[in-house]
Image: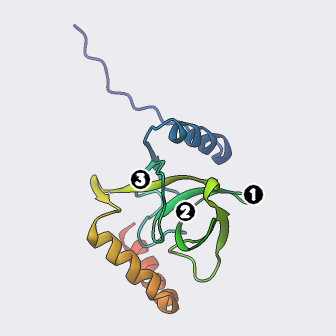
Amino acid sequence: MTDQPNLELKITLPNESMLSEVTSLLQTGHRVKLRARGNSMLPFITGDRDSIILQKKKTVHRGDIVLARIPDRGYILHRIIAIRDNEMTLMGDGNLQATEQCNRDQICGTVIEIIRNGRYIRCTSVTEQCKAWLWMWLRPLRRYMLAICRIERRLHV
């Protein structure tokens, strides 16, 4: 018997190609784990530190973090801040004002868990939902709180 090294394969693909395949997997009932990139979801999801688990859900609600495919924009991972009939307004937690519009059929999947330092955080937990609602409610103060988050992040890198 020989000892085989435990190899982990890491592949980097263009977002459009990879997320198109992720969407196909979600449509067939699979859960998908992805490494987060970017800072548009600070402070809840930090790029290059956190991972997310996505799942296709039959219904989405205000406050859910979703992967959506926006025409002329591509794929985005943002929070639903408003729902009106079939139209959703999305906004990144790390954004100050910019929002996007999409329809329900443009939602590819919903973040059900965030993985941070090996710890799984359920997005449906009462604690996480309260933090998300508080963050949405404190939108006028985001500029200052995000500055603190970014400084703190630089100190720990």
- Residue at the image position 60 percent from the left and 41 percent from the top: 18
**Which amino acid lies under the numbered mark 3 shown in the image of this protein?**
Ser
Circles 1 and 3: CB distance less than 8 Å? no
Q: Amino acid at mark 2?
A: Gly
For numbered disc 2, what is the local secondary structure?
Answer: loop
Crowding around mark 3 (Cα neighbors within 10 Å: few <14, some 14 to 19, many 20+) is: many
The kind of secondary structure element at disc 3 is strand
Q: Quadrant of residue 38?
A: bottom right
Q: Looking at the image, is mark 1 or mark 3 nearer the viewer? A: 1
Residue 157 in percent (x, y) is at 40, 66
| Residue 131 lies in quadrant | bottom left
Residue type for callout 1:
Pro
Question: Which x, y percent locates residue 72?
Answer: 77, 59
For label 2, count other residues whose C-alpha is less than 10 Å away and answer few (under 14), some (14-19) or many (20+): few
Residue drawn at (44%, 64%), measured in percent from left and top? 46
User: Which of 127/93 is in front?
Assistant: 127
Mark 1 or mark 2, earlier in chain = 2
Measured in 3D between alpha carbons, the distance from the residue under mark 1 to the one under mark 2, in whole angstroms, is: 20 Å
The colour scheme applied to this rendered structure is: rainbow
The residue under label 2 is 38
What numbered label is drawn on residue 51? 3
Q: Position of residue 70 (x, y in %)?
A: 69, 59
| CA gap, disc 1 and disc 3 | 25 Å
Look at the picture and state if 32 lies above or below 46: above
Q: Are marks 1 and 2 in contact (CB under 8 Å)?
A: no
Front tag of 1 and 2: 1
Is 37 on the left-hand or right-hand side of 6?
Answer: right
First reached walking from the N terminus: tag 1 or tag 3: 3
